[in-house]
Each structure stands twice: as structure tokens, then as C-alpha cells.
Image: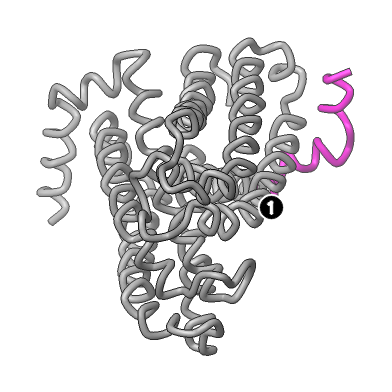
Amino acid sequence: MWEALEQTPWVKTLGSTGWMYAVVAVTHYLMMFWFIGSVAVVDLRVMGLAARKRGVGELAQTLFPWAWTGFTLAMVSGFLMFATDAGDWAPSRGFHIKLTMILLSVVFAVIVQRGATRWGQTPEIPTSAKLIALISLLLWIATILSASEIPSLEGLG
Amino acid sequence: MHDMVLAFAKWLEASPWGVMARESIWAYPVVQLTHFTGLSVWLGTNFALDLRLLGVGKQRTTAAQMAQDLFVWNWIGFAIVVTGGFMLFSGIATSFIYNIAFQWKLGLFVPTALVWHVIVQRKARNWGQGTDTPGIAKLAALTEILLWICVITAAVEIPNH
């Protein structure tokens, strides 16, 4: 099935046209940096380490909605990159770990986003909230690490 | 000039951290992780300010406030980027200096984007006093985004040259 995806005419065109693949890769990096950076700043704010003058809820509501646009575009461009070499990517253990990390990170990002308004209304941010923010931050770092390990351990990408 | 750059690149490659970045199976991904984590914080905060100046998204915070809120982590992010980037460069410095995409990236796009960013960040205090931002602010913010896209494009092209 993945081999078939790889052989689809438009995927073959994408994979063999230098500038097209570059556009997709640039989009992937750009959107990923934008999204992770936005989540990281909110995580740091919840932990009391960034933008302390700004309310947690206000910062989260300013940064998150557009960050999800970035996330969506990172996923779309990521899928396109995956498609050009789908036969090799699909069975890759490193890639499975990366996807799992993304899923976990997104779950925690959603928890932080939903909790931010509530946490911002209390005089002191609860310790449990700070812990959730720390886990969210560490998960994103783990996600980037798992992505960086794939080429050196499996020769993919 | 060329001899100096080459001598510096050779020295970096032979340095303990240069050897480590090149030869250890773990060091390279960790160094790349550092570069990418820094980039997320750096570019994430850059774009947050640029988009606010462009008037995109929620307008509850002014651009001036946002520039101030994000200032510290913006530059912490930059410090992390430079640390990771320096280590990446050290591993294969002599190949990098002859790479045309790397030359464009570090010789032109990065300095331009960086100077432009400093100007936008400083100007945001005046441009971003109210809810609406002037046309010049929007143009400057859009230019900054395009400059960073140039940087990333050059970076993505490095392995192809």
C-alpha cells in the first residue's frame, strides 16, 4: 500500500522535482518551529519562567490559535515528505516513535491550552499545572530528538 | 581572508567538540536537537511578534506588549540556536565553507534577517502602541518572515550541494 502511494504520479513528481520538495521541506521546518516555539513559550509561562507580566490565559489565547494553523501545515507537509519515500518510512521504528511522540505532545499541548485560562484565574498557578507544562515542554524536545535520531540510526531522511 | 577562514575551519574540525560532533552517533543528533529546539523558540517568538504587527490573529495584546513579553525567551532561543549551530558547523567546518547554500545562508541571509529582526523588535515599541499597526510595521514584519524563509530555504538546500 505504501509502495503504491510512493508510485502515485503526483508523489513521483514531488519526489523528483528539486524545488517542489524544497518548498515542502521549508514549509515543514518553518511551521514546526512556529508551532513548537509557541507551545514552549506558553509552557514556560505556566511554569512561571516567561512573560510573567502577561496573564497565562491571555498569552495562551494569543499564541495558540495560530500555532495550530502551523501544526496543521507541518502535518500536511510532513505527510507529503513521507509519501515520497513511504515504502521506507512506514516500517521504520524511529518514525513510529516520532509519530507517538507527536501524538503525546499534542495531547499535552491541548491540555495546556484548555487549562491556561483556568490556571490564570487563580492567584498562584497550581503545581500540577506546572508539572503538566514541564511534561509538555520535555515531550516536544523528545519529539525533535526522535526526529533527529532517525537519519543517523536508520539512514532515512 | 580565505586562508584565515580555512585555517579556522580546520582548527574547529580538529577541536574536541568538532571530533565529537562528527564521530559520535549520539552527539550529532543531540547537537541537531539543540539547534532545532533553539530555532523553535527563536523563530516561534519572532513570528508571534511579526504576525501581531501584521494584525493577524487575536488582538488582545498590543505588539509593543508582545515584544516586551517575548524579548527574554526570544534571545535565549537565539543563544541556543547559535550554540547548536556552532557545534554542527564544527563537525564538518571545511566542507561547510565551500558549500554554496551554506555561504548564502551564513554570509547573506542570516546577518540580514538578524539585523532586520533587531530593528523590528526595537521599532515594535512605537509601532505597537495601539491595537492597529501602521503600514510600515506590516511591511517590515512581512519582510522579516520572508527573510527567515530565505534562511531556512538555504539551510534545506545545504545537503544538496
A118 and B44: which is toward the camera: A118
Q: Quadrant of residue A157?
A: top right
Element class at badge 1: helix
x, y percent for residue A124: 41, 43
Question: Circle 1 marks a residue in which chain?
Answer: A
List the residue tagged with mark 1: A69
Q: Main secondary structure of the magenta part?
A: helix
x, y percent for residue B145: 51, 65
Q: Which residues are magenta?
A: A1-21
Is A27 left or right of B65, judged from the image as shown?
Answer: right
- Does the magenta segment cover residue A9? yes
Taking the spot 76% from the left edge, 42% from the top edge, the residue there is: A14
Query: Relative to A153, is A101 above or below?
Result: below
Is A63 left or right of B159, judged from the image as shown?
Answer: right
A104 and B153: which is toward the camera: A104
Query: Relative to A18, is A104 above or below?
Result: above
Q: Quadrant of residue A7?
A: top right
